[in-house]
Image (tube, rainbow, N blue to C red):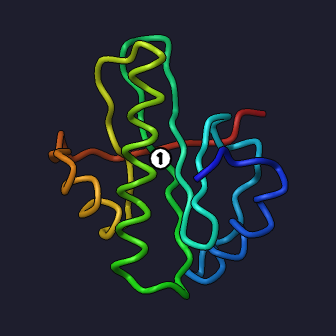
Amino acid sequence: MRPVTSDDFVVIDRWLSLWDHPPIHPDLYPPTGLIEDGFGAGWILCTDSKLCLMENFVTNREVDRTQRRDACIRIAVALEKIAKERGYKFMGAYTAVSSVKEAVEQIGYKLANMSWLLGRELT
């Protein structure tokens, strides 16, 4: 496992396409992300409070589901370590993907609430 670099977005875009998702512009990813080559990637969204969020998990659909889940767990644990080192006290996990939800539940995350995420481009 290693930090995501700009060179990784070609692979990440391919993984997204395997799930029928459009590419995400690199500027929309937080600066801190980890990739497990061949398996998946995830990011930590840092705030100016004691809360941070894991987000934008993407996995290689060509890999077995169990291997993808295990990679998500390893990435989540590593992102937690980064968050603790930076002084965060609470970490949430934002996802619309059931396998990512299941992976983080296996390491102790619980459903915090149900809400809508709305957004728009700022021009």
| Quadrant of the frame with the C terminus | top right
Q: Position of residue 61 (x, y in %)?
A: 52, 83
Amino acid type, label 1: Glu
Toward which corner of the image does residue 90 lie, by quadrant?
Answer: top left
Q: Position of residue 67 (x, y in %)?
A: 40, 76
Q: Position of residue 78 (x, y in %)?
A: 44, 42
SS class, disc 1: strand
Toward which corner of the image does residue 92 lie, by quadrant?
Answer: top left
Examine the rendered structure and indicate whether residue 25 appears above or below residue 14.
Answer: above
Identity of the residue drawn at 39% across and 22% down:
84
**Badge 1 local density, few (<14 within 10 Å), some, or many (20+)?**
many
Q: Is residue 60 left or right of residue 54?
A: right
Toward which corner of the image does residue 35 lie, by quadrant?
Answer: bottom right
Residue of label 1: 55
Single out the residue that lies furthest toward the right: 7
Examine the rendered structure and indicate whether residue 9 appears above or below residue 33.
Answer: below
